[in-house]
Image: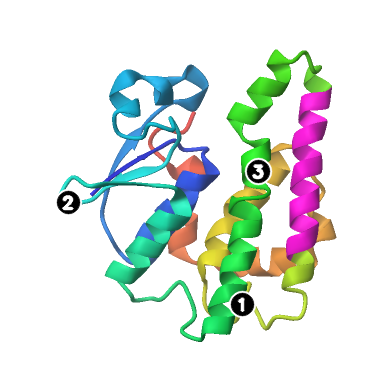
């Protein structure tokens, strides 16, 4: 398999964790987002959205969107499972993950922040926007799992929820968010980061890290 990504992309970070948890090897192909390499014609032929990650399986079929990639990996390599077997629990995990992957991360990513700058917003305001988005999303996520058993988001093993949470907390810190306001999320993060699969997927551990 080939994983197209970028060391600081939180979406690619999610997929790296999934690959590590399932002990799956992949060739990592970096695309420098700040240099616009994701918009190169050769990459747009792989992912017309011009986003990372994209995963090419061994047959050369391309999958895009991190959550879809992770669910495919989970279906093809079910151990350890990243979604609960119980339908209600599975829906709760998906809802938490999507609160981050669909409603929080996209509106503070590089493309959106660049557009805010193009529209004339001062850099201070751009950074304030990104911090606000993170606080809004993380506050909701804190409430979603406040009464869930730990130490992970949904019990004693990592799920798709944790794969989305850990990269988003890293984003929040980059934008100066005081994450101490989210003790339940920090408990889940600490449990996750104690695992090699999460630690080895961290941005600073990647070959293309700057």
Question: From what the image shows, is residue 80 above or below residue 163?
Answer: below
124 horizontally vs 155: left or right: right
Pointer 2 or 3: first along the chain? 2
Instruction: Describe the element under mark 2 as helix, strand or loop.
Output: loop
Task: Mark 2 vs mark 3: give the one in front.
Answer: 2
Please name whichever residue, 130 or 197, is drawn nearer the observer in this view of the structure.
130
Residue 175 seen in the current view: yes
Q: CA distance from mark 1 to mark 3?
A: 22 Å
Instruction: Describe the element under mark 1 as helix, strand or loop.
Output: loop
Badge 2 vs badge 3, beta-carbon distance below 8 Å: no
Pointer 1 or 3: first along the chain? 1
> In the image, is residue 179 part of the stretch drawn in magenta?
no
Residue 183 spot, x, y in % from top left? 79, 66
Looking at the image, which residue sits at the far left? Answer: 59
Residue 24 spot, x, y in % from top left? 28, 60
What residue is shown with label 2?
58
131 horizontally vs 60: left or right: right
26 horizontally vs 19: left or right: left
Mark 2 neighbour density, 10 Å: few (under 14) some (14–19) many (20 or more): few
203 horizontally vs 189: left or right: left
Mark 1 neighbour density, 10 Å: few (under 14) some (14–19) many (20 or more): many
Mark 3 neighbour density, 10 Å: few (under 14) some (14–19) many (20 or more): many
Q: At x 52% / y 37%, what residue is drawn?
A: 8
Quarter where residue 39 is shown = top left
> In the image, is residue 131 part of the stretch drawn in magenta?
yes
Magenta span: 125-141
Question: From what the image shows, is residue 78 above or below residue 124?
Answer: below
Please name whichever residue, 198 or 79, is drawn nearer the observer in this view of the structure.
79
What residue is shown with label 1?
154
What residue is shown with label 3?
171
Pointer 2 or 1: first along the chain? 2
């Amino acid at each position: 398999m080939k994983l197209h990504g970028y060391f600081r992309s939180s979406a690619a970070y999610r997929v790296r964790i999934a690959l590590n948890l399932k002990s799956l090897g992949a060739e990592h192909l970096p695309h420098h987002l700040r240099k616009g390499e994701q918009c190169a014609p050769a990459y747009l032929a792989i992912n017309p959205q011009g986003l990372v990650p994209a995963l090419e399986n061994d047959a050369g079929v391309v999958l895009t969107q991190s959550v879809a990639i992770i669910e495919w990996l989970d279906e093809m390599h079910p151990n350890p499972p990243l979604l609960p077997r119980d339908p209600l629990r599975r829906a709760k995990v998906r809802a938490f993950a999507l609160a981050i992957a669909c409603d929080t991360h996209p509106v503070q990513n590089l493309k959106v922040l660049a557009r805010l700058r193009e529209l004339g917003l001062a850099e201070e305001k751009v950074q304030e926007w990104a911090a606000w988005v993170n606080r809004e999303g993380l506050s909701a996520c804190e409430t979603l799992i406040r009464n869930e058993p730990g130490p992970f988001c949904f019990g004693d093993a990592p799920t798709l929820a944790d794969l989305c949470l850990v990269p988003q907390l890293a984003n929040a810190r980059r934008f100066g968010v005081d994450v101490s306001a989210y003790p339940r999320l920090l408990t889940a993060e600490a449990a996750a980061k104690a695992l090699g699969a999460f630690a080895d997927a961290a941005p600073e551990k990647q070959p293309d890290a700057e």
